[in-house]
C-alpha cells in the first residue's frame, strides 16, 4: 500500500498509549529478567553463556522494537524519528531472529543430550535453515511490498514452533521433576503459538495480499531506497489495532521462551 510521504496527523489515541505503555513495562521487565539470569553463578557453562549472549541480543532488539514499533510494508511507525526507519528496524529484527533460531537449535541439541533422544538433534539442525528462508521471504515482502512474502514467513515460523512443540513434548516424556514441568510449558506455549500464527497471522497477510494489487509493488532496488526514506508516523488506533495482538505476544512470550532456554541446564540439574 502506497501512502503519502508525510506523517499522518492524528491525535495520540488513548488505546495506543495504553498499549505502548504496556510494551515499555514489558521491555523493562524482560531486561530485568535477563540481568537477573546473567547474575546466576550456576550458569557458568559454555551452553548457558552462549545462550545468554544470544538471548541478550534478542531481548535488546525486542525492547527497541517495543519502543519504536513499525508496520514494515505500510511504512507505518509511531514516532517520526530516524530510529523508526523501516530498514533499520528490519535489519535489527533479522539479527535478533537469527539469534533466536540459534538459541532454539542449541536448546534442542543440549536437550537431546540430557534426555538421550538423538532425533532431537536432527530436528535442531533444520531450524536455522528454516529461519533463514523465513527471513529471505520477509525481506522480499518488505522491499517489494508484496504481502505474500510475510504469509510465507509466518507459515515457516509456525512450522518452527510446531517442531519445537513436538520436540519438547517428546522430551517431556523422558524428563523428570522441574525439567518435565518446563518442557510441558514450552510444549503448550509453542503448540498454541503455532496455531495462533497459522489461524491469525498467516490469514491476515493473505487478506492484505488480496487487497493490494500487484501493480503497486516495487522492485527490490526501489524498495530498498523506499524503506530507507519513507515512513508515516501515526497513533491512529485503526492503523495499529491489527498489529497489537501479534506484537504483544511476540515481545512477551517470545522473549520469555528465549530467556527460558538459557536456564535449561540449571533446571535439568535441579531435577536430578
Image (tube, rainbow, N blue to C red):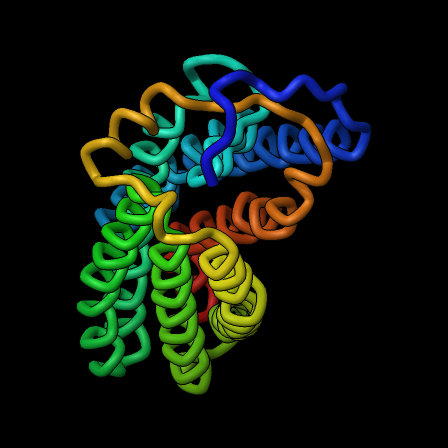
**Looking at the image, can residue 40 be seen?**
no
Give the x, y percent position of residue 6.
53, 16
Task: Compare residues 136 and 229 and report the one nearer the observer.
Answer: 229
Left or right of residue 119, residue 43 in this image:
right
Give the x, y percent position of residue 81.
48, 13
**Looking at the image, can residue 157 be seen?**
yes
Residue at the spot 52% in from the left edge and 56% down from the top edge: 211
Left or right of residue 151, residue 120 in this image:
left
Residue at the spot 23% in from the left edge and 82% down from the top edge: 119
Q: Is residue 126 above or below residue 22?
A: below
Residue at the spot 57% in from the left edge and 52% down from the top edge: 246
Residue farthest toward the front in the current orientation of the protein: 215
Task: Compare residues 105 and 114 and report the one nearer the observer.
Answer: 105
Give the image quarter of residue 145: top left
Q: Is residue 253 above or below residue 18?
A: below
Give the x, y percent position of residue 203.
53, 66
Residue at the spot 57% in from the left edge and 45% down from the top edge: 247
Give the image quarter of residue 58: top left
Give the x, y percent position of residue 266.
41, 56
Residue farthest toward the right in the current orientation of the protein: 14
Q: Quadrant of the C terminus?
A: bottom left
Task: Compare residues 98 and 86 and report the one nearer the observer.
Answer: 86
Count of number-bearing discs:
0
Q: Is residue 204 above or below residue 141?
A: below
Amino acid at each position: 500500500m502506497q501512502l503519502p510521504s508525510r506523517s499522518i496527523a492524528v491525535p495520540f489515541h488513548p488505546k495506543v498509549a495504553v498499549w505502548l505503555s504496556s510494551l515499555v513495562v514489558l521491555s523493562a521487565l524482560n531486561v530485568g529478567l535477563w540481568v537477573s539470569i546473567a547474575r546466576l553463578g550456576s550458569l557458568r557453562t559454555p551452553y548457558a553463556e552462549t545462550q545468554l549472549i544470544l538471548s541478550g541480543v534478542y531481548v535488546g532488539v525486542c525492547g527497541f522494537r517495543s519502543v519504536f514499533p513499525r508496520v514494515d510494508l505500510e511504512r507505518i511507525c509511531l514516532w517520526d524519528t530516524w530510529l523508526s526507519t523501516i530498514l533499520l528496524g528490519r535489519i535489527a529484527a533479522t539479527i535478533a531472529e537469527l539469534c533466536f533460531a540459534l538459541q532454539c537449535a542449541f536448546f534442542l541439541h543440549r536437550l537431546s543430550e540430557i534426555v538421550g533422544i538423538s532425533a532431537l538433534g536432527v530436528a535442531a539442525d533444520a531450524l536455522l535453515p528454516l529461519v533463514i528462508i523465513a527471513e529471505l521471504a520477509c525481506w522480499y515482502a518488505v522491499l517489494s511490498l508484496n504481502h505474500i512474502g510475510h504469509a510465507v514467513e509466518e507459515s515457516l515460523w509456525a512450522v518452527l514452533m510446531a517442531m519445537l512443540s513436538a520436540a519438547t513434548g517428546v522430551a517431556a516424556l523422558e524428563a523428570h521433576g522441574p525439567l518435565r514441568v518446563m518442557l510441558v510449558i514450552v510444549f503448550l506455549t509453542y503448540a498454541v503459538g503455532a496455531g495462533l500464527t497459522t489461524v491469525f497471522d498467516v490469514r491476515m497477510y493473505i487478506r492484505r495480499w488480496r487487497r493490494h494489487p500487484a501493480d503497486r509493488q516495487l522492485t527490490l532496488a526501489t524498495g530498498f531506497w523506499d524503506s530507507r526514506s519513507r515512513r508515516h508516523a501515526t497513533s491512529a488506533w485503526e492503523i495499529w489495532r491489527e498489529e497489537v495482538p501479534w506484537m504483544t505476544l511476540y515481545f512477551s512470550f517470545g522473549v520469555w521462551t528465549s530467556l527460558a532456554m538459557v536456564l535449561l541446564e540449571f533446571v535439568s540439574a535441579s531435577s536430578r
